[in-house]
Structure formats: structure tokens, C-alpha cells
């Protein structure tokens, strides 16, 4: 079973990379892009019998390693 | 009295730390590979700078699961003096011995330059030989040194006087222009509540001899000697 984990900086945390990308887009003429937040994306191949078990396992590894809860939050999707 | 210098794959200031302790300070030093199961009887532990595990995922995120980190955490929780420098600071936040985290520099640039920091607390085993308000000139070399913690955590750090070093100008003034990376409240280094775990982004071990531009960092290592004394017992504050 596959799971996708999206890790992003918490809204209260300044994202200098996202800001730099937004600035670049503005200089390219894309004024319609108001803001950019950069994050990380993980594809997990899981040995799990059910979507709930896959979601639980993905959440556990996100809590322990993939995301740092001090600065980041995450979202899990399961096929 | 012996210093352990922990070596992770990708550490690159381990030899600087070893040299500063052994050849400049004149204390015993020993490298401890990250797969070791114990700290070889060390009295002081240094987590050095570098790029452990290539900074994959997040700085320090994978090193904190190295086998040596369980003994490091146990040593710290027993009150043993632990110094984290640069990547060592990042590892200590990831493992939870220090609050907050280190974000990408606000300029998004890797910074390699000399900075000044003001000693904000001298009741730690790595600042007890300094004077309060002393200004130290040391190099930084990092891409992720922008200290972040939520406002309530920052307030608690200030209330408990856990901010140990703050970026300042050459005269000791805390101004934003002297803050190289955007760190919250100009924080360059801090300690845990018990005050035995200290970490900073600047490199004291690279500023221990005037031949390399500054000897200001030596006081950090001399403090550990003063704090431990001849019997190896920690006494600060």
C-alpha cells in the first residue's frame, strides 16, 4: 500500500526559500502568484493491510522522522 | 579530564575540536565514532560542526538516531556537560535536549564569516570562565542557523536566562544588522533548563589561536575545565 506525506513549515514559521521563489516569480512577471511556501513530499511503500493501518504507520514515521513538529506540520494521503 | 568528540558521517569540525582541546587547551581528547555504544569515560562531550548525513531530510535529523546519541542523552540527563557547535546545535534540537529549531538563513545563503556574540549567561559549564557581557569574535559557517522557537518558548528561554550567546556588533550592542541569519531575538546559543547542555552556531573551536584570526573561543573550552575542576565534578552557578 502506498502513502504520500506532505511536510510543510508551520504557518507561523518564515519560509525564506518560498519567499525567494515568490520574488523570482514576481520578477518574471507572475504577479498573480501571491505567495509560495516550499515543502517536502515523500512516497512511502508500506506493508499494511488496510488504509487505516497505512495511515497510522505513515503518521508514526512522519511524527518520528519525516517532520520536526517544532517547525513543521504534515498531511498524509493513502491510496 | 577527558573530552569526547563525537564523529558522525559528515562531521567536518571534529578535527578542529580535537585540536583545540588537545593541543591548545592541553586536555585529553578522544574521537568517538557515532556507532560506538558508550562515551569512553569522557567528562565532557562535544557534538562538532559539519554536515552529518549530508544534511539529508533536515540538519541533524538523522544523526540524532545514531547509536551514540542514546549515551549522549543519558550523559546529558545525568548532568554531564555537553557542547553542541553548529551541526551539533542542530542535532541537539532534533534530539530534544534543546528547544526550538534551526531554519534556513533568512538570506537563503550559506554564510562563512566572522561574527561577534555577547555572553549573556556565565552560569554554564561552557561560559563560567567568561565575564558577563564579554564580546567574543568567532566564525560562523552555516546555511541553517536561523534560530526559531514559538513566542511562548522564547519568553520562557528569556525568563529562565537560557539564552547564552546573542549576536552583537563589535561593541556588544544587540542590533539587527549584527544578526547574520535572522535568528529570533538574536539568539546565537542557548542552554537547557539544567544549564549543562550548551550549544551555539558560531565555532569557538575555530577561534582558539590568534594565528587563525581570533582566540576568543578558547574561553568556552577553558570554562569546561574550570567547571569540572580536578575531581571531575560539575560546579557552576
Image (cartoon, coloured by chain):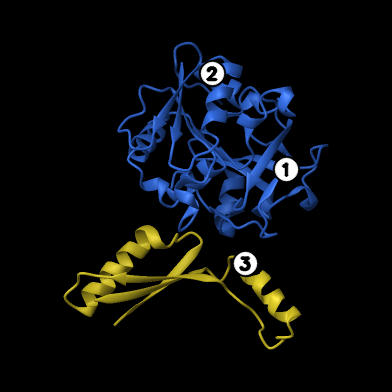
Q: Pinpoint residue B109: horizontal percent, then vertical percent.
A: 68, 56
Q: Is residue B121 above or below residue A25?
A: above
Please identify the quadrant where the C terminus of chain B is shown. Answer: top right
Distance, label 3 to label 1, CA atoms, is 21 Å
Query: Is the residue at mark 1 from the same chain as the one at mark 2?
Result: yes
Give the residue pinned by disc 3: A17
In the orientation shown, which residue stands out farthest toward the right?
A: B171
Count neighbours of disc 3 (C-alpha within 10 A) and say few if under 14, some if 14 to 19, many if 20 or more: some
Report the side of B29 relative to A24 (left or right). left
First reached walking from the N terminus: tag 1 or tag 2: 2
Q: Determine the chain carrying the residue at label 1.
A: B
Say left or right for B157 vs B130: left
Query: Compared to A35, does B11 lie above or below?
Result: above
Q: Position of residue A4 (x, y in %)?
A: 36, 75
Tell me how far mark 2 sits from mark 3, CA to CA. 40 Å
Which quarter of the figure has residue B225? top right
Question: Crowdedness of circle 2 by 10 Å Cα count: few (<14), some, many (20+)?
Answer: some
Q: Colour of chain B?
A: blue
Pinpoint the chain carrying mark 2. B
- Which label was assigned to residue B113? 1
Secondary structure under the numbered disc 2 in the rendered image: helix
Query: Which residue reaches farthest top?
Result: B230
The answer to whether tags 2 and 3 share a subunit is no
Q: Are marks 3 and 1 on the same chain?
A: no
The percent coordinates of residue B60 (x first, y second) are 47, 49
Residue A26, percent from left and from top: 73, 80
Is residue B229 depicted above or below B160 in this figure?
above
Residue B70 image label: none
Residue B109 in view, yes or no: yes
Q: Label 1 neighbourhood size at 10 Å, few (<14), some (14-19), many (20+)?
A: few
Residue B161 visible somewhere in the drawing: no
* Figure colour of chain A: yellow
Amino acid at each position: 500500500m502506498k502513502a504520500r506525506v506532505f511536510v510543510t513549515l508551520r504557518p507561523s514559521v518564515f519560509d525564506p526559500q518560498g519567499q525567494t521563489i515568490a520574488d523570482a516569480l514576481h520578477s518574471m512577471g507572475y504577479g498573480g502568484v501571491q505567495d509560495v511556501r516550499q515543502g517536502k513530499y515523500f512516497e512511502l511503500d508500506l506493508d499494511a493491510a488496510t488504509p487505516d493501518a497505512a495511515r497510522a504507520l505513515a503518521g508514526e514515521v512522519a511524527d518520528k522522522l519525516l517532520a520536526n513538529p517544532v517547525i513543521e506540520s504534515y498531511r498524509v494521503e493513502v491510496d | 579530564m577527558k573530552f569526547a568528540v563525537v564523529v558522525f558521517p559528515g562531521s567536518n569540525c571534529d578535527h578542529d575540536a580535537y585540536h583545540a582541546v588537545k593541543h591548545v587547551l592541553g586536555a585529553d581528547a578522544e574521537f568517538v565514532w557515532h556507532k560506538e555504544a558508550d562515551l569512553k569515560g569522557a567528562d565532557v562531550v562535544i557534538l562538532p560542526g559539519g554536515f552529518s548525513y549530508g544534511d539529508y531530510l533536515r540538519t541533524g535529523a538523522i544523526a540524532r538516531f545514531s547509536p551514540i546519541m542514546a549515551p549522549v542523552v543519558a550523559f546529558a540527563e545525568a548532568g554531564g556537560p555537553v557542547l553542541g557547535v553548529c551541526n551539533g546545535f542542530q542535532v541537539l534540537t532534533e534530539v530534544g535536549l534543546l528547544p526550538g529549531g534551526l531554519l534556513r538563513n533568512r538570506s537563503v545563503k550559506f554564510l562563512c564569516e566572522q561574527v561577534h556574540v555577547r555572553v549573556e549567561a556565565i552560569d554554564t559549564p561552557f561560559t563560567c570562565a567568561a565575564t558577563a557581557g564579554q564580546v567574543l569574535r568567532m566564525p560562523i559557517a552555516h546555511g541553517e542557523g536561523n534560530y526559531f522557537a514559538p513566542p511562548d518558548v522564547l519568553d520562557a528561554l528569556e525568563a529562565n536566562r537560557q539564552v547564552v550567546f546573542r549576536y552583537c556588533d563589535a561593541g556588544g550592542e544587540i542590533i539587527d544588522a549584527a544578526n547574520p541569519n535572522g535568528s529570533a531575538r538574536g539568539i546565537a546559543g542557548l542552554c537547557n533548563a539544567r544549564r549543562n547542555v550548551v550549544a551555539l552556531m558560531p565555532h569557538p573551536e575555530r577561534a582558539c589561536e590568534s594565528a587563525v584570526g581570533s582566540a576568543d573561543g578558547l574561553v568556552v573550552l577553558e570554562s569546561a575545565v574550570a567547571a569540572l575542576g580536578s575531581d571531575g565534578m560539575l560546579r557552576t552557578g
